[in-house]
Structures are given as C-alpha cells and as structure tokens.
Image: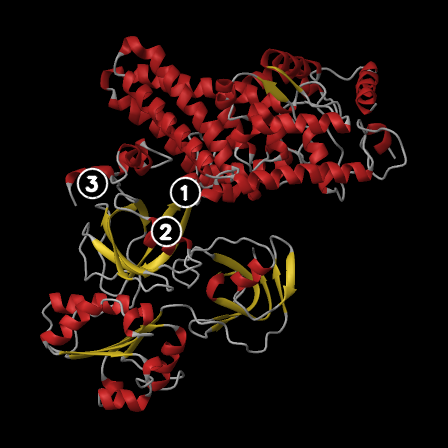
C-alpha cells in the first residue's frame, strides 16, 4: 500500500525494478562490474602483498616510536601523534581491510580474515558478522542494515521520528568520542532488545569474547604500558587514551562520510526482495559516498575514502580502489547514475547537517527536494 | 629454552603485544627470530636424482628457528613457501634426516611433482637463504624408543624418505639388532640415496638392503616373497611407506583388514584413490548452495568440481587445513575405510568421500 509513496528511488514505469535503469541495463551494469572484479582478482600478486606488508611494518614503527617517546615527557605530543597514526593504520587500512578477507589469497595467517584481530575493544570475530555480513549484504536497506544510525541515531527520513531523536547531535558526538566502544557494543543489538525483537539471552554467547577483548585492550593501554614508564604513569595513560580518542574521532568521521552525506539513497525491504546481482551493485553504488583527497589521506582512511568502490568490491585489496574509481565513474556516466563524491569538508558538513536535521520531525517540503534530485539523476 | 625465549613467551609480553602477538614484531627485525611460530632458512639444495625426462629429486637442508621442537624419525612437517613473494602455499613433506633435537638442522627430500607448486618451487627455484614456514613435526609413523631386535622396513618410490630417516637414526643410535630394508623403485637410475644405501649394504652392520625393480624383472611384493626373505615376517615389527597399491599389498600380506596386524605400521605416501564403488545420493554444500550427484570422489574433489575453492593443505588427511563441518550424511575415510554418520561433525574433506546423501558446510 504505502510502498510506492515511501520509495525514494521511484522513477518511470514499465519495469519490474524500482531503479532508473531497465532490467536489461541493470544486468549489463552488473556484468561490467563483475568483469572488473574478475580482472583484478586474476591480477592480485606481489605488489599487493608488498604494499600491505609495508603498511604493517610502518604501523609497528609508529607504535614502537610512540610508546618509546612516552619516556621523554617533552615529546608527549609527538608520542601521542605517533601512536594515533599506528592505531588509525591498524584500524582502517589493516584491520578493516584484512578482516574483509582482502588479503586471504596470500595464505598468510598474519593477514588472514579468520585470524586477524585489531587494536580496538571490539572483537574482530563479532564485528565481521555485523559488518561483513549484515552491513555489506543489506547496505542501506532500512530495517535490515543496522549501520543506518547504529541503532542510536536517526539518519534517514524513513526512520519514524520520536522525541528521543531530539538528542541526535548529542548521541552522534558521544558515538564519535567512544566510537570503538560503540562498535564493540553494536553486536549486542540493544535497540532490537528494547524493541522486543531480540532476547537478552541471545547475547550470552557474545559476552566472553567481548569481555576478554575489553580486558586485554584495557590492561595493555591503561595499565601495562603506563606502568612500564614508572613515574610517568599518568602521562602515558593519558597519552594512550588520547591516541584511542584520536583514532575514534577519525574513524567515525571517515565512516559517517561513507554513507550519510546528502544524496545517498536508502532502500526499502520490498525493493530489494529477490534482488539481482545488478541491483545489488546499483544499491551499493547509490548507498555510498566518496571523499576526495591525496594519497596519504586515502591510506589513512584505509581507502574507505573510496567507500563506493569498497561497497562494490568489498573483498578486493583497498589499495586498488583509487585506480578502479576511474572506471567506475566512467560506467556511472554511461548509465546516468550518480557518483557521490566531494571534499572531506563538504561531506562532513553534509553529514553534520543531516544529523541535526534528523533530530527534528520531518517537514513536508523535504520529500519534494528529494524527488527533484532523483528525477534529475534519472534524466 | 633460554632466558630470552622464556621472556618472549611470557604472559606479560603477550599482553603488551596483544592482539598481534610478539612474533609479528620479531619477524620484522629478523625472520629467524620467533617466540611461537616455526620458520626455517634454506641452507642447501642438493639434487639427489636428476634423470632427464623425469622430475628431479632434491634434499633441502633447513636451519629452523629456535622454536623448532625437533622430530622423531619417520615424522613429517608442513612446509609453506611464498611463491612470487605473495601466495603462501603449504604442503606436507617427510623429514629425511635422523632424529633431531630442538633447533637442530634437518632435511626434507622430495620429488618435484610436475603439478606441485611447493615441491617444484623447492627443488627448482629455492636457493640458500630462502625462508619457509613450518609446522612442528607431526605423525605417528615413528620408531619406538626401545627398538626391537629385528625390524623390517618396506618402502616404495618416494616413500623411502621416512624409512631412510629411521635407518639413519638407527645407525646413529648404534642399534645392534637386525634390520631388513626392502625398497621398490622404478629403475636403478631412479634410486634416491643410492650411494648411501650402497655404503650401508657393504658396511655389513646387520642391515640387509634389498633394492627391487619389478619393471626389470625383480619379484613383486607377495607373502611368499616376504616369507622367503624374512621367515616369519608377520611377527617382525614392520614399517611400510609407499603409494597406495603397495600399502594395500603389504596390508594383505600381514592379514585381513578386519584384524589389522599389530606388528605393522603403515603410512601412505599418497592418499589412495577413492575406489569406484557405487556412488549414490547427492552431495550438497550448504554455505554456497551448490549441489550435485555424488561422484564417489572425496568431498574436496567434488567441491572443486563444482567450482568451490575450499581451504586445503596437504590433501592427504594430515594437516587439518580443510576441516569442515558435515551437517548430515555418512562419509567414509578413504585412508582407513572407516564410516561415520554423526551430525555436525568436523571432517577433513580431502580424505572423506560421501556414502549416499551428504551435506557439508562449504
């Protein structure tokens, strides 16, 4: 009944799908992207291996340098910076990408998605379920993708407003500061428990792994390394906490710019029933946004600045995304599809305004503006 | 174990290097440094046999990291190489040198299998200095600490390596008893360790060496032949290693398979091909949603025939890399013939063939 009015990607008729493309175009679109994927898979080799190993080596050097500089109090800011870089590299270019299985083909247990765990309080094992499976399979499908607002925020008009969401900007700020904790607790699906869709007992199997990970991370950063610096204990503790905070803020911002800037589409469950490969690609493309920047910026974002390419090819080594983005943009142009990209400042501003806008109930006018942009794209 | 190793393996170091572990840091400094993992540097590659037109055989000498726990003669090791610096591939090889202690050098002897990524790399391309990844020594095909007065070794082809390790160990242990050594090879040119065996034969330390080439007219393995060579052979502790047909012949000679002989230890050098017994039912791979009529081959082969790429290592039931969960159905272990029908059971798909309908989580 209300599907037609709710859908934001509706366009012309005479199609079984709800997109701006015909079924045939959608299939051809999917085949083109499949071909890119196959080509890159066949080409993986020494350069990719050398690249990720180099990043791992650099991460260690930054970590060791950072931890060492805590012994010299005047170097404290440098120590924090160095440790922050190490934690960001570990979280994004290494942890996120390795746990996606991007380097499984290397057969190296140290870079294998089943073995790797990252330097955050979230157990990699649990993150892989909610991220690789839920988020990457059901990307931007309302009611299925739990990464839309992470069960805390309202990030889409189709999430019904309630007074709780008046706190949207505050919740976003807290989530940013405590991002690793948010990611760790994400798998407990608290919002589904509150809604009665999940039982508290369902979380029981998750507790041991979670507790163990939190304990080990806490002991390392807030007890052992500070203790090793003797009288400098409080300084080192503060330094480690700051490095974790810097990493949290950075990761939060990069990730929020990947799915929540203006113009990113969400989808209804009905639209995605019996979805074809082509539609899956279409949804990944329109459900993600990129950030432009230099090479160093891309490395520090784990190449998630190419969120679109990451969502199209989640298991291809992320270092390939920049070169692939040229091809993807060319394909998008031919099919008349939007390729959402912009500078970090633009995307951040866009996300921040959405967070604030969503705090308030919808105004009727908004649906019109959305429809206009969609029509312009479809044209 | 030195003080350094004790510290590196301590709980404190584990906590400081969590979650990656100390080995990730050590290997960056020196690939020969390790606290838990086992790696080795190749120090020598020696061609044993190089018959034109046939795959060459080489002995590779390895200097392991101090984490290597040593081995008992007859054991094997998983050896992983990085081909072109990126794809690590692991296979199982038998150790050919005598018993080793922790951290000792040892050798593996192998034929460059034309289709074998690892064996060809080791024989044809590896040079001194190349690093390889190892497991600890594995396998139950070993000599007991108290070696019996008379032992019989039977080997075929490359199956000579574990037996050679045993023979060398016995010599080093100055075993005073009798050893009968029976080896089947294609031709004298194909004989690995020919010079060493010749020397052993001539030294006459109670070791009877019989090198047989049935293709050149030597007798085949049979109970009668064994009886002639070693009267009462069924009561002599025997170690046999070789290709499946030879092992089958040895097993038959030592008694029916229902009551396996207690004096006989065997090891397949290659897993037996699945026999062409009537293959019934359908095989379903739950995770990928693939399904096909059961061909009777191993589950690994059937999965690969459907285009799946399950993880695997040795492909002979040793390394457990291919372990997968069988949801339902009966499988037969192609090495032992044992059948099992338990649900939610972990099986090694490389040596498990379905008997009737079968569902595996691959």
Mark 3 crowdedness (10 Å alpha carbons): few <14, some 14-19, many ≥20: some
On the image, numbered disc 2 is attached to which residue? Answer: B121
- Find residue B102 and report its horizontal and vertical position in percent: 19, 52
Q: Chain of mark 2?
A: B
Earlier in the chain: of badge 1 and badge 3, it is 3
- Find residue B131 and report its horizontal and vertical position in percent: 30, 44
Mark 1 crowdedness (10 Å alpha carbons): few <14, some 14-19, many ≥20: few
Whether labels 1 and 3 share one chain: yes
Nearest the viewer among A337 and A355 is A337
Q: Is there a contact, CB below 8 Å, between mark 2 and mark 3?
A: no
Looking at the image, residue A10 sits to the left or right of residue B89; the answer is: right
Whether labels 2 and 1 share one chain: yes
Distance, label 1 to label 3, CA atoms, is: 32 Å
Question: SS of the residue at dot 2?
Answer: helix
Q: Is residue A302 above or below residue B140?
A: above
Q: Quadrant of the C terminus of chain B?
A: bottom right
Residue at 76 percent across and 42 percent down: it is A273
Q: Is residue A331 above or below residue B362?
A: above
Residue at 53 percent across and 62 percent down: it is B301
User: In the rendering, which numbered label is found on residue B341?
Assistant: none
- Find residue A371 and report its horizontal and vertical position in percent: 83, 21
Residue at 48 percent across and 28 percent down: it is A93
On the image, numbered disc 1 is attached to which residue? Answer: B84
Q: Chain of mark 3?
A: B
Earlier in the chain: of badge 2 and badge 1, it is 1
Nearest the viewer among A338 and B123 is B123
Looking at the image, residue B130 sits to the left or right of residue A247; the answer is: left
On the image, numbered disc 3 is attached to which residue? Answer: B5
């Amino acid at each position: 009944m209300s599907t037609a009015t709710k859908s934001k990607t509706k366009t012309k008729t005479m199609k079984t799908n709800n997109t701006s493309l015909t079924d045939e175009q959608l299939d051809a679109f999917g085949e083109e992207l499949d071909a890119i994927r196959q080509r890159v898979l066949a080409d993986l080799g020494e350069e990719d291996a050398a690249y990720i190993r180099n990043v791992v080596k650099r991460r260690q050097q930054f970590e060791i340098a950072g931890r060492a500089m805590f012994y010299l109090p005047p170097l404290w800011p440098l120590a924090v910076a160095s440790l922050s870089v190490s934690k960001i590299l570990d979280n994004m270019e290494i942890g996120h990408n390795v746990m996606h299985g991007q380097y499984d083909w290397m057969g190296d247990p140290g870079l294998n998605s089943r073995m790797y765990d990252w330097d955050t309080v979230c157990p990699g094992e649990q993150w892989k379920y909610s991220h690789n499976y839920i988020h990457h399979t059901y990307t931007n499908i309302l009611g299925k993708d739990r990464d839309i607002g992470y069960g805390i925020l309202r990030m889409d008009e189709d999430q019904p407003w309630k007074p709780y969401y008046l706190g949207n900007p505050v919740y976003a700020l807290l989530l940013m500061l405590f991002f690793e904790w948010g990611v760790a607790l994400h798998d407990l699906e608290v919002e589904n428990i509150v809604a009665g869709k999940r039982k508290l007992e369902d979380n029981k199997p998750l507790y041991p792994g979670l507790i163990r990970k939190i304990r080990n991370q806490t002991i390392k950063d807030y007890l052992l390394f500070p203790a090793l610096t003797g009288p400098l204990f409080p300084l080192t503790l503060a330094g480690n906490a700051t490095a974790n905070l810097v990493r949290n803020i950075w990761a939060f911002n990069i990730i929020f710019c990947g799915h929540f800037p203006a113009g990113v589409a969400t989808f209804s469950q009905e639209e995605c029933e019996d979805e074809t490969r082509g539609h899956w690609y279409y949804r990944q493309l329109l459900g993600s946004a990129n950030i432009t920047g230099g090479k160093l910026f891309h490395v520090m974002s784990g190449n998630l600045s190419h969120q679109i390419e990451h969502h199209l090819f989640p298991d291809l080594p992320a270092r390939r995304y920049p070169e692939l983005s040229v091809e993807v943009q060319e394909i998008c142009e031919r099919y008349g599809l939007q390729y959402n990209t912009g500078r970090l400042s633009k995307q951040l501003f866009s996300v921040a305004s959405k967070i604030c806008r969503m705090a308030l109930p919808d105004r009727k006018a908004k649906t019109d503006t959305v429809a206009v942009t969609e029509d312009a794209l479809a044209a | 174990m030195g003080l350094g190793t004790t510290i590196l393996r301590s709980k404190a170091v584990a906590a400081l290097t969590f979650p990656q572990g100390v080995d990730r840091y050590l290997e960056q400094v020196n690939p020969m440094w390790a606290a838990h993992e086992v790696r080795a540097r190749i120090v020598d590659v020696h061609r044993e046999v190089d018959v034109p037109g046939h795959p060459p055989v080489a002995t590779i000498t390895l200097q392991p990291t101090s984490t290597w726990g040593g081995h008992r003669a007859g054991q094997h090791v998983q050896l992983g190489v990085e081909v072109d610096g990126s794809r690590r591939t692991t296979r199982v090889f038998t150790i050919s040198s005598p018993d080793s202690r922790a951290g000792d050098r040892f050798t593996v002897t192998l034929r460059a299998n034309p289709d074998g990524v690892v064996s060809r790399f080791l024989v044809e391309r590896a040079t001194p200095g190349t690093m390889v990844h190892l497991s600890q020594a594995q396998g139950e095909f070993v000599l007991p600490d108290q070696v019996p007065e008379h032992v019989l070794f039977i080997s075929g082809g490359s199956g000579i390596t574990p037996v050679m390790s045993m023979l060398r160990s016995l010599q080093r242990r100055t075993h005073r008893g009798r050893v009968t050594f029976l080896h089947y090879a294609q031709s004298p040119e194909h004989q690995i360790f020919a010079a060493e065996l010749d020397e052993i034969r001539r030294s006459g330390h109670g070791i009877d060496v019989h090198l047989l080439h049935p293709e050149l007219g030597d007798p085949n393995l049979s109970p009668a032949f064994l009886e002639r060579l070693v009267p009462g052979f069924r009561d002599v502790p025997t170690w046999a290693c070789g290709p499946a047909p030879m092992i089958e012949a040895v097993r038959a000679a030592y008694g029916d398979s229902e009551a396996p002989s207690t004096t006989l230890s065997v090891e397949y050098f290659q897993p037996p091909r699945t026999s062409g017994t009537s293959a019934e039912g359908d095989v379903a791979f739950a995770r990928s949603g693939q399904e096909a009529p059961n061909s009777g081959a191993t589950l690994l082969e059937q999965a690969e025939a459907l285009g799946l790429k399950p993880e695997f290592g040795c492909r002979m039931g040793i390394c457990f890399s291919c372990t997968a969960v069988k949801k339902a159905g009966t499988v037969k272990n192609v090495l032992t013939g044992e059948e099992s029908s338990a649900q939610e059971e972990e099986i090694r798909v490389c040596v498990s063939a379905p008997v009737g309908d079968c569902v595996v989580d691959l």
